[in-house]
Image: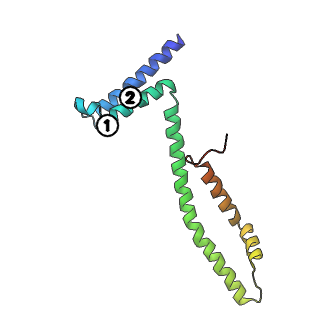
Amino acid sequence: MLADLLTWTRLVRIAVVLISIAVGASGERHGPARLYGARWRTARLAAKVASIDPELGKQLRQVSARVARQARVLEDELHRLRPLEARLEQVVRQVEDTSDEEVDDELFERLAERFGLLRVRPALQRLEQAHPDAPDDEP
């Protein structure tokens, strides 16, 4: 009984996808030549995928939207970070000029660590390794 209901639900989903593609987003009907075009083949493949794994499409859309949204936020913050690093370097030079204290690389690095700057590049490297196109290190 449950298996029949799941099969019926999958068939309804497939039918809805196929009808929506045939009708089109604007509600205009397309001719038969258009029906077998790329949109039709894509819809047919999506329906087959949904018949095997009904939640996959929804999960991919949700995760993809979140990743894209977070990438935009991260990109904005990274654009703000470089000028802030430059300001820090400028202010440290001013400190050196107005005092007799020289700031060597080790001291500057400790200051950068105190402000959290040294966590940025390793975090970006982890992101690069988590990129969907990055090769897996697993055997």
> Residue 120: image x %, image y %?
66, 61
Figure disc tally: 2
Q: Residue at x 73, y 75 (%)?
A: 108
Front residue of 128/15: it is 128
Q: Which disc, if any, is residue 25?
A: 1
Q: Residue at x 45, y 21 (%)?
A: 10
Tell me: residue 7, above or below residue 137. above
Quadrant where the C terminus is found in the figure: top right
Q: Earlier in the sequence, mark 2 or mark 1?
A: 1
Element type at mark 2: helix
Q: The residue under label 2 is which amino acid type?
A: Arg
Disc 2 to disc 1, how far (Cα)?
16 Å
Q: Quadrant of residue 23?
A: top left
Front residue of 75/125: it is 125
Q: The residue under label 1 is which amino acid type?
A: Ala
Q: Residue at x 42, y 20 (%)?
A: 11
Q: Which disc, if any, is residue 102?
A: none
Element type at mark 1: loop
Q: Residue at label 2? A: 44
> Residue 35: image x %, image y %?
28, 31
Asked whether residue 58 appears in the rendered view, the answer is yes
> Is the residue marked by circle 2 packed among few (<14), some (14-19), or many (20+) residues within 10 Å?
some
Q: Residue at x 31, y 37 (%)?
A: 25
Q: Is residue 90 left or right of residue 105?
A: left
> Is the residue marked by circle 1 packed among few (<14), some (14-19), or many (20+) residues within 10 Å?
few
Asked whether residue 29 appears in the rendered view, the answer is no
